[in-house]
Amino acid sequence: AGPGLAMCTAVFFSDLAPLLIALDAVVEIRSRAGARTIPLAELYSTDGGAHLAFGNDEIMTAVLVPGPGKDVRFCHMKFSLRGAIDFPVANVGVRVGIDPSGACTGAKVVVGAVQTCPAEIRGAGEILKGAAPGPDAIEEAARAASAGVNPFPNAYESIGYRKKIVGVLVRRALKELLSPDRHD
């Protein structure tokens, strides 16, 4: 998918991975030597020839998702050109913690389908932490997410368009998650 590059490389498409990474999922990997766990975010590599961080004798046996906690909200958003069975132009997994006063205790924004691996956009989450997020903070986080991705240059929509879509998805997710009318 990346002509002229030194290694096999392609956009990583997964609807589930960004949300699971936002929720701090870990994976269990087994071999004859035993089992080990790693954060799901560390499972992926940019090398398309060896895109998973385990050896030929290993297999993933479990995905473990910690309980999100009482004051945590999360969602997945996806945009694709067709409504059914289509690779996304972009997708996001977003998790936010909200204290009783409405202030954000932490946020994690993970983007998928634009780069060679799902990517946490730390700047977007940091913008929200510690404040009662309103429209300005949501917009700033959406801009940070859009600026923080480096879409893989393939023929599936332009880089600028995909960056813009990431911002739109993050904005929509945060508006949904941070709505004062939301009842969990």
Image (cartoon, helix red, strand yellow):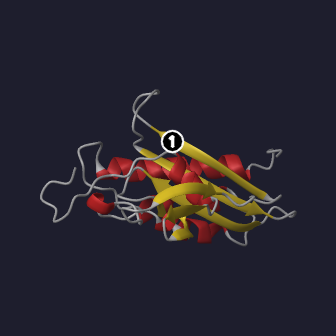
Within-10-Å neighbours for mark 1: few <14, some 14–19, many 20+ = many
Residue at (48, 66) in percent of width and height: 32
Camera-side residue of 168 and 87: 87
Q: Position of residue 72 (x, y in %)?
A: 76, 58
Camera-side residue of 49 and 75: 49
Instruction: Using the rendered image of the protein, determine whether residue 80 is visible from the camera's viewpoint.
Output: yes
Q: Residue 26 sits in which quadrant?
A: bottom right
In the picture, measured across the screen, residue 2 lies left or right of residue 32, that is left
Q: Position of residue 70 (x, y in %)?
A: 83, 58
Residue at (60, 67) in percent of width and height: 125
Q: Is residue 173 above or below residue 141?
A: above
Q: Residue furthest front?
A: 32
Residue type, label 1: Lys
Secondary element under disc 1, as helix, strand or loop, is strand
Residue at (29, 63) in percent of width and height: 47
Camera-side residue of 64 and 95: 64
In the picture, measured across the screen, residue 45 lies left or right of residue 97, that is left
**How many labels, in total?**
1
Q: Position of residue 152 (x, y in %)?
A: 30, 56
Residue at (16, 62) in percent of width and height: 5
Q: Is residue 129 above or below residue 81?
A: below
Instruction: Using the rendered image of the protein, determine whether residue 139 is visible from the camera's viewpoint.
Output: no
Q: Residue furthest left?
A: 4
Q: Position of residue 158 (x, y in %)?
A: 28, 47
Q: Residue 101 sits in which quadrant?
A: bottom right
Q: Residue furthest right?
A: 100
Residue identified by numbered label 1: 78
